[in-house]
Each structure stands twice: as C-alpha cells, then as structure tokens.
Image (spheres, rainbow, N blue to C red):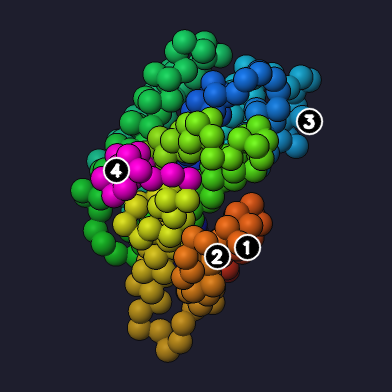
C-alpha cells in the first residue's frame, strides 16, 4: 500500500474519532460545571488545556467565557481540533482514499460532514447543545458501524483502526486528567458526594456507565472507576483496551517481516510498562503524572507509525 494512502486512512479515522471525542469533552465540561459551587472561567480553561488547544484559543479569542470555549471547541475553523475542523479533515482524507473505502463508508462520512455543516452553521444555543452533541456522536458512530460491517479485514482496515485507537486512548486519558487534577475543587472534596458525582460524569462521558454498573453494581467508587477506564481490557475505551488493539493491528501489518517494526516494539513497551500494574501502583505513581507520560508516549508512537509506514512518500 502506498504511504499516502495509509496516511489518509490513518488520519481519516483519527479525525472522526477526534470529532466524537471533542463532543464528549464538551459534554464532560458541561456536566462537571453543574457540580461546581461557583461558576467561572476556570473549568473551561482547564477543559481547553486538556484538549491541547488553550494557547490557540488565547491567540484567537479576546475573553475566556463558557460560550466562547464551547464555540471554539465545537465549530471554530481556526481550531484544527474543533468538531467542525475534524469532520472536515476526515472527509478530505476520505476523498483522497476514496477507492480504498466501501461505498457505504464514503456515504456515511459524507453524510456526517453535511450534517455537521447544518448543525454548526451558527453558534449553538445552550439549550440545543445536548441534541447537537448527540447528533454528532451518532453520525460518527454510523461511519464506524459501516466500517465494521462492510470493510475487508486487510491492511486498509488496520490503518483505519490504528488512527481510531491512538485517538481514543488519547481522549480517555485527557478526560481522566480533566477530572482528577483540574476540575476537582479541592483536596478536601476527595471521597465526598461531589467527588463521586464527578467520577460518575466521567463514566458517562466515555459511555462506560452501563458496563461499569454491570461489573461493580452500585458499590464502585473512584478507585474502581479509574481501574475500569485505565486497566480493564474489556472496556472499549479503556487505555488497556486501546493499546491492546494497537498492538494487534501493528502485528497484522508487520506479519511476514523478519523482525518487529519500531512502532510495534514501542506499542508493546507502552503496554508492558504502563498497563501491566494494578491501580494502586498507578495512584502511588501519581495519576496526573501517569497520564501526562502516557500522552507523551502516544505522540511518540503516532510519529513512529508515520515513519515505519512512510506516510509521506
């Protein structure tokens, strides 16, 4: 497969996942803000920092407000990670690799783009925000469903999955970081009803509440939630699940080669070093430090994938 085709597939699916995840991040900020005793710019500044776009926001916007932050994350074309920019980028990459996609996948991608144009044509009112975020998640989920249902399990599929799981792991880590070190009002709130409500919000933001309740019932607390979202290999958005899938797809892509690829080796090292301990070891290390290191390693892994498969040749 040509490197530019692999590149287009990787970024098409990474961008689709980013659009959905940014919508989830907005919803997380909204829900957690409702648990705060006082309202201010702090929580939205923290959400933007988590999304990696605070510096760009400050360069492009005059004032930090809830409305400005949501608009920046949702529809501002100056933000390359906004929902609108991400869906636009996904469609552009889909056009470049059109012959590698099934008709159903292309139609679903194009429909997601057209729906986003309509939904985000103007600033979204707060009362309409839940419906808009839900519609965006449904549209991107439809592309994922068409991919599962119609694409051959070949190298095309593997590159699509690499983009998906790199971005998904990044998002779960960022949402955990928003909760634990940024949006919790103070250390005195740990273990309180406010702390528990915020952890419940984190579960909802990654569609994990139902699965968590099946596993832990009503007794699970913050430790169990962190365990579920970081180390449980059955949970489709956990860090462990995503890394396991990345290792699988890299192994498929390197099958028949005389030695392991650099990206495959790096993915296995991340899995072995960061996802083979229990949750107590993670908390002893420091959850914020753990997440920041993990995010840095994901960036390195993404760059190594681009190098190994010559994305720009």
Q: Is residue 100 toward the left or the right of residue 193 in the image?
A: left
- In the rendered image, which quarter is residue 32 located in? top right
Q: Which residue is mark 4?
A: 217
Q: Which residue is mark 3?
A: 59
Tell me whether the residue at label 1 lies in contact with that at label 4, contact meaning CB atoms closer than 8 angstroms. no
Camera-nearest residue between 206 and 135: 206
Badge number at residue 281:
2
Image spot of residue 265 (x, y percent): 51, 77
Badge number at residue 268:
none
Camera-nearest residue between 187 and 263: 187
Q: Is residue 187 visible?
A: yes
Within 10 angstroms of label 3, few (less than 14), some, or many (20 or more) residues?
few
Sooner in the amino-acid sequence: mark 3 or mark 2? 3
Sooner in the amino-acid sequence: mark 1 or mark 4? 4
Tell me whether the residue at label 1 lies in contact with that at label 2, contact meaning CB atoms closer than 8 angstroms. yes
Image spot of residue 49 (x, y percent): 68, 39
């Amino acid at each position: 497969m040509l490197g530019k085709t692999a590149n287009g597939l990787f970024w098409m699916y990474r961008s689709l996942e980013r659009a959905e995840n940014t919508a989830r991040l907005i919803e997380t900020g909204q829900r957690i803000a409702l648990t705060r005793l006082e309202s201010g710019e702090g929580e939205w500044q923290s959400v933007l920092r988590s999304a990696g776009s605070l510096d760009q926001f400050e360069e492009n916007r005059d004032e930090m407000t809830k409305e400005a932050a949501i608009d920046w994350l949702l529809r501002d074309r100056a933000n390359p990670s906004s929902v609108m920019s991400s869906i636009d980028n996904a469609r552009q990459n889909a056009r470049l690799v059109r012959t590698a996609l099934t008709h159903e996948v292309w139609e679903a991608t194009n429909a997601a783009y057209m729906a986003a144009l309509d939904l985000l044509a103007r600033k979204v009112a707060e009362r309409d925000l839940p419906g808009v975020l839900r519609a965006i998640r449904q549209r991107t989920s439809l592309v994922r469903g068409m991919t599962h249902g119609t694409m051959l399990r070949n190298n095309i599929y593997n590159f699509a999955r690499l983009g998906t799981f790199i971005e998904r792991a990044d998002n779960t880590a960022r949402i955990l970081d928003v909760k634990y070190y940024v949006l919790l009002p103070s250390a005195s709130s740990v273990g309180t009803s406010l702390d528990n409500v915020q952890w419940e919000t984190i579960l909802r933001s990654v569609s994990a509440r139902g699965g968590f309740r099946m596993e832990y019932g009503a007794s699970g607390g913050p430790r169990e939630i962190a365990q579920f979202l970081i180390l449980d290999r059955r949970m489709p958005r956990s860090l462990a699940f995503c890394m396991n899938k990345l290792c699988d797809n890299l192994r498929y892509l390197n099958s028949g080669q005389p030695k392991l690829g650099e990206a495959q080796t790096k993915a296995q090292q991340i899995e072995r070093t960061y996802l083979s301990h229990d949750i107590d070891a993670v908390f002893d290390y420091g959850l914020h430090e753990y997440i920041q290191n993990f995010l840095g390693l994901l960036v390195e892994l993404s760059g190594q994938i681009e190098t190994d498969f010559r994305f720009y040749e």
